[in-house]
DNA sequence: GAAAACTCTTAACCTACATCAACTTTTTTT
DNA sequence: AAAAAAAGTTGATGTAGGTTAAGAGTTTTC
């Protein structure tokens, strides 16, 4: 009976992950089990850190429920949000994980969040034990790259208002869930500017 | 004798490519041959297009010698250079290749350039015939993603002068090889601004 | 449920960089 | 080697968005 509960619990925990994986590749029962053995469920309460600058990144996190953010802090002490990670997104610092160098990123929870952590070794093991994941991660990073390229482009050619409209269009759900100044930070504009832009948008 | 020359020629053509591949993965003679059968050597003269906006991207190019650029043209008709691709770099439009949608990118040659083209089917065949390349491309895109992320960050937090200095630091060789207004375009600043920045830098 | 800590708004002022326009220098074409 | 085209410079002027500062909500904490 206890085992049954544990099984159910584990099954429930991996729901989003397997949904996400199956959108990209076909996996067998066995490969599912490998995942269950390698991923570590972990919850983060609001404001709790998954990674802090100066650390070496040990995990890449998959978000099952909730919302994380990664950001850097520049010379003047201003935050620049690099990524929001709601349900179904991965977050971490690939560079630090790969090289073992310390990270400049901070990752913390905007909402109470349930994650599945994959350690760096876990990642290697996954690749060896279930090589289909080579393809899964290739596709994942491919999409991230394309998204990042677009974001860069938007960042250069759009003005502040267009950036905001574009953001609303791309991530309507995130707009509802994060404080406004976080969106400003993601867009690379000041909270004051965003506030003015929003007023102008309603005035017209 | 002719076969000998052809062989030598082909060997020579693939030099950079194999060097690049071997930095990431180990490949066998057989896999080398598969490459030789799938890549199409093609030269581009200065200003010649590899891809134009409105086309569907059919090839991804590896640069053996020379220098290509990819850029988009915004509403006001200004070019934004997304990438310079000197020897040892890949260039194309991943999104258009993957989806079959038309591209917004233009790719042309800044210098006379020798490339190896991989068609979209060629890519699929390569993956099937030599699955190690799944890993090669994953690593490749992983690095591109990290680089893109850094570029975005720099673009948001640095001022124009810092962006230029950063560029010189990262790509000293490219600075020598491309016209100054192309660098301005890559950095998302005007040629006039870059000219003024350079004057200020020598004055001090 | 009062205090403290965030979050958002508004206004006055400032600045980095864009725009426009004219001119010089370099490179390419014929 | 002249003409044309492309690349780079310089100055005057404009402006989007940053900065500073103060106040008004809102949410969290104890």
Image (cartoon, coloured by chain):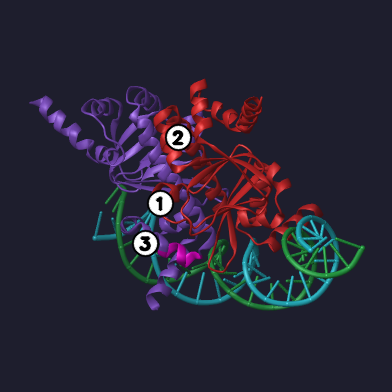
Chain colours: A purple, B red, C cyan, D green
Which quadrant is the C terminus of chain A positioned in? bottom left
* B129 or A33: nearer the viewer: B129
C-alpha gap between disc 2 and disc 3: 29 Å
* Residue neighbourhood size for the residue with mark 2, other residues' Cα within 10 Å, grouped as few (<14), some (14–19), many (≥20): many
Looking at the rendered structure, the secondary structure element under dot 3 is helix
Dot 1 lies on which element?
loop
Q: Which mark is residue B138?
A: 2
Task: Say left or right for B151 vs A202.
Answer: right
Residue positioned most to the left: A1
Q: What distance separates the C-alpha of mark 1 from that of mark 2?
A: 21 Å
- Pick whichever of labels 1 and 2 is earlier in the sequence: 1
Q: Secondary structure at mark 2?
A: helix
Closer to the camera, A185 or A144? A144
Q: Which residue is mark 1?
A: B100
Q: Residue at the front extreme?
A: B1
Q: In the image, what residue occupies the spot 39% across and 78% down?
A: A203
Q: Residue at x 50, y 60 (%)?
A: A189
Q: Position of residue B184 (x, y in %)?
A: 66, 56
Q: Which mark is residue B187?
A: none
Q: Position of residue B78 (x, y in %)?
A: 59, 64
Q: Nearer the viewer, mark 1 or mark 3?
A: 1
Name the residue located 46 percent from the left edge and 67 percent from the top edge.
A161
Look at the image and say whether residue A82 sits in the magenta stretch.
Answer: no
| Residue range highlighted in magenta | A159-165
Nearest to viewer (mark 1 / mark 2): 1
Residue position marked by numbered label 3 in the rendering = A169
Chain identifier of the residue bearing label 2 in the image: B
Q: Quadrant of residue B23?
A: top right
């Amino acid at each position: 009976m206890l085992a049954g509960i544990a099984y159910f619990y584990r099954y429930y925990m991996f729901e989003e992950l397997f949904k996400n994986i199956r959108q990209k590749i076909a996996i067998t029962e066995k490969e599912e089990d490998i995942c269950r053995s390698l991923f570590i469920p972990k919850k983060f309460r609001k404001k709790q850190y998954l990674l802090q600058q100066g650390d070496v990144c040990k995990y890449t996190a998959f978000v099952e429920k909730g919302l994380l953010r990664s950001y850097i802090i520049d010379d003047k002490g201003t935050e620049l949000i690099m990524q929001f990670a709601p349900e179904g997104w991965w977050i971490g610092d690939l560079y630090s994980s790969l090289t073992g160098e310390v990270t400049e990123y901070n990752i913390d929870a905007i909402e109470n969040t349930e994650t599945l952590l994959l350690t760096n070794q876990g990642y290697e093991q996954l690749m060896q034990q279930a090589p289909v994941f080579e393809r899964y991660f290739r596709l994942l990073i491919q999409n991230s790259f394309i998204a990042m390229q677009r974001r860069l482009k938007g960042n250069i050619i759009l003005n502040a208002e267009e950036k905001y409209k574009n953001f609303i269009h791309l991530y309507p759900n995130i707009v509802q869930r994060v404080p406004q100044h976080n969106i400003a930070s993601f867009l690379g504009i000041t909270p004051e500017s965003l506030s003015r832009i929003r007023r102008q948008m309603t005035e017209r």
